[in-house]
Image (tube, rainbow, N blue to C red):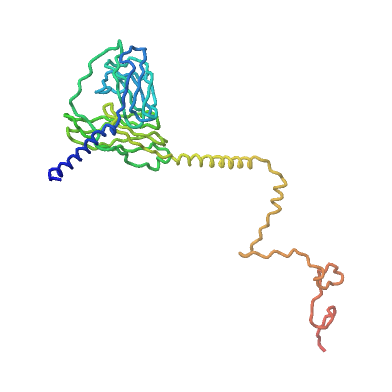
């Protein structure tokens, strides 16, 4: 094999690999959501069948007729330019496809009009299809402003922690932190963001949050916006960030249950009945009638107080009677034995006293 052939062979192999990769590229491309209409023109009061493909499986979608919109510029003014009262909801199947019949209604703003399909929960996705509403006013779209254009440059995150009061039902709060940049040609002054919190499948409730500052073209800045839920909130929440009618980011937030409230109710259910029982027993003990015999019995059972003599307690007199077999010799004429003869060790008779006199 010549040197030229040895050089061309690796080049051929590289070209073949690149061709295979290039040919297999479309197979791995991410499929974008697509919306198709059964008719492209209909009058108010009619209906149109909306079908779509390329959506996430088992995803809830909202289908609306919107004015002042085109597929390339989207819906100018957000859902305020749509006939929200005549919208329809639909859920995609396992392949990410759907089909739904939509009544045609006149939007609150002039046409050009589109059928706007967007996700309700999860990652944001939307698609539009042109629809001519017969008999509805048509006006040119407003000119695009050549000012600043704000974009998210970093992932959003929630900072902060819950305190002790949150454990007892206080509103949970966090701070939404993200970095924005200005890719336009003009400065952005004091932009107003919208922060929304959604629980489960419910739509978010939006609150305006203004960031004070000026963002020059080509510059970036860190933005910190407060987020607060209602008192006693718990479960899985989703915090969304919107600017100029477009959702820029979403951040999940798992909020713990306020167990302090549960503990409070448990203690309340135990303490209150116990207090009522004690109060009732006190009332019953006070109002019930007293028996006279119980008072006399109480008095008879009381022990008498012993008198004190000189700071010392005198011994009580013996009250036990003397047993008969331990009684001393009784004097004749004294059957009770109260008088007894004196004891003497001499052999003399106790009745004959011994006297000594002068001899």
Which residue is at the front of the view, 229 or 135?
135
Q: Is residue 44 above or below residue 178?
A: above
Which residue is at the front of the view, 94 or 298?
94
Identify the residue at the far right of this view: 333
Q: Is residue 192 above or below residue 275?
A: above
Measuring from the top left, give residue 37's x and y in whole percent.
33, 18
Q: How many marks?
A: 0
Location of residue 25 by image quarter? top left
> Horizontal placement of 28 versus 295: left or right?
left
Measuring from the top left, give residue 359's x and y in whole percent.
82, 89
Location of residue 45 by image quarter? top left
> Horizontal placement of 5 versus 49: left or right?
left
Which residue is at the front of the view, 293 or 10?
10
Location of residue 225 by image quarter? top left
Which residue is at the front of the view, 60 or 320?
60
Residue in view at x 28 percent, y 26 percent: 245
Q: Is residue 337 above or below residue 70?
A: below
Q: Is residue 74 above or below residue 291?
A: above
Measuring from the top left, give residue 279's x and y in whole percent.
58, 41
Residue in view at x 27 percent, y 23 percent: 74
Residue in view at x 17 percent, y 40 percent: 11
Q: Quadrant of the N terminus?
A: top left
Identify the residue at the far top of this view: 135
Identify the residue at the far bottom of this view: 359
Measuring from the top left, give residue 316's x and y in whole percent.
69, 64
Identify the residue at the far front of this view: 1
């Amino acid at each position: 094999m010549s040197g030229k052939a040895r050089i061309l062979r690796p080049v051929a192999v590289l070209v073949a690999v690149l061709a295979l990769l290039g040919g297999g590229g479309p197979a791995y491309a991410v499929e974008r959501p697509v919306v198709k209409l059964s008719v492209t023109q209909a009058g108010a009061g009619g209906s149109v069948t909306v079908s779509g493909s390329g959506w996430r499986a088992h995803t809830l979608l909202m289908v609306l007729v919107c004015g002042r919109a085109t597929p390339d510029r989207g819906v100018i003014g957000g859902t305020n330019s749509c006939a929200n009262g005549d919208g329809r909801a639909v859920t995609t199947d396992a392949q990410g496809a759907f089909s739904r019949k939509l009544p045609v209604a006149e939007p609150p703003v002039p046409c050009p009009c589109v059928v706007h399909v967007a996700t309700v929960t999860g990652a944001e996705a939307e698609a539009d299809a042109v629809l001519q509403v017969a008999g509805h006013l048509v006006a040119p779209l407003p000119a695009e402003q050549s000012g600043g254009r704000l974009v998210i440059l970093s992932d959003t995150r929630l900072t902060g922690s819950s305190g002790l009061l949150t454990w007892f039902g206080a509103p949970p709060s966090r701070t939404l932190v993200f970095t924005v940049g200005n890719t336009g040609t003009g400065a952005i002054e004091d932009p107003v963001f919208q922060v929304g919190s959604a629980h489960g499948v419910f739509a978010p409730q939006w609150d305006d949050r203004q960031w004070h500052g000026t963002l020059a073209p080509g510059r970036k800045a860190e933005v910190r916006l407060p987020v607060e839920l209602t008192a006693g909130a718990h479960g899985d929440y989703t915090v969304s960030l919107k600017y100029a009618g477009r959702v820029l980011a979403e951040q999940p937030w798992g909020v713990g249950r306020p167990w302090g409230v549960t503990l409070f109710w448990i203690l309340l259910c135990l303490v209150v009945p116990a207090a009522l029982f004690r109060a009732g027993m006190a009332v019953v003990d006070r109002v019930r009638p007293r028996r006279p015999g119980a008072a006399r019995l109480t008095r008879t059972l009381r022990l008498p107080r012993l008198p004190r003599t000189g700071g010392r307690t005198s011994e009580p007199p013996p009250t036990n009677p003397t047993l008969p077999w331990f009684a001393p010799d009784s004097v004749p004429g004294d059957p009770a034995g109260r008088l007894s003869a004196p004891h003497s060790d001499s052999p003399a008779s106790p009745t004959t006293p011994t006297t000594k006199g002068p001899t």
